[in-house]
Amino acid sequence: MRNQSLTGEGSVADSSGVANSIRHSHATAGDSAFTLVEVIAVTVILAMFAAAAMLTVRDSLKEAGRTLFVDRLHTIDNQLRIQAGKQHTGTVVLILDLDSHRLSKINQSAGETILATEIPVDRVSAGHRIVQTGRVSIQYRPDGSSTSFAVRIVTGKTPARWLFVAGGTGQTLEYENDEEIEALLMLPQTTRSYAR
């Protein structure tokens, strides 16, 4: 049997004097852990991915909100036309409040009722004029018709779109530019030069 002794250099010397190197495999902090720079780099990259995802989700939610508002306005318009036809007396009025961003209705029997809040509308075109502030009233007659009107819907980074509501039928159409709406509503020339 050979005599072996452990030297301070991490090698084993046997009785023949030949050194066999044996590397000790004990872990140091630098070998098995991430450095602070690596942790910060990964955190920054993850934060950038999260920010990009949030922007995409936010824009998608705003577009969904625009679609929901278009559907809701179309439904409310149809309901008010039916309600006006059933009343035969008095009027039913749709109120678009651009200052408080609310949509409400007024009728003789129930007074004013709020139908929607936080509406994404910045302009309304009715009665041969474009309005940016205040309240706009759309009156529904006993035959179920109203004045034709249009609302400009703005959401996020998507371009603003106009929703045109035909007064006689309630048919809704979407348009992208102001000139098409002005031509449909036959706005006077002074309004057509409206600063955007």
Image: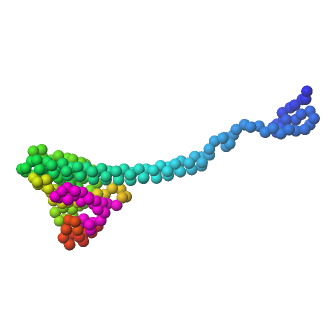
Which residues lie in the magenta part? 159-182
**Where residue 180 appears, x then y in whole percent?**
26, 66
Of all residues, the one furthest to the top in this rendering is: 1
Q: Residue at x 38, y 52 (%)?
A: 60
- Image quadrant in which you'd find residue 177: bottom left
Q: Residue at x 62, y 44 (%)?
A: 34
Give the position of the N terminus as an image quadrant: top right
Whether residue 170 sits left or right of residue 41 in the image: it is left
Taking depth in this image into account, of 78 and 60 the one nearest to the observer is 78
- Image quadrant in which you'd find residue 129: bottom left
Taking depth in this image into account, of 142 and 57 the one nearest to the observer is 142
Of all residues, the one furthest to the left in this rendering is: 89
Q: Residue at x 24, y 57 (%)?
A: 172
Classify 92 as above or below 5. Answer: below
Q: Residue at x 22, y 56 (%)?
A: 171
Q: How many marks?
A: 0
**Where residue 40 appears, x then y in whole percent?**
56, 48
Magenta residue check for 160: yes
**Applied colour scheme:** rainbow
Magenta residue check for 83: no
Classify 8 as above or below 185. Answer: above
- Specify whether residue 106 is in view: no
Whether residue 11 sits left or right of residue 167 in the image: it is right
Taking depth in this image into account, of 102 and 26 the one nearest to the observer is 102
- Specify whether residue 87 is in view: yes
**Where residue 157 appears, x then y in whole percent?**
37, 58
Taking depth in this image into account, of 41 and 86 the one nearest to the observer is 86
Classify 149 as above or below 28. Answer: below
**Where residue 136 appears, x then y in whole percent?**
18, 57
Classify 146 as above or below 79. Answer: below
Give the position of the C terminus as an image quadrant: bottom left
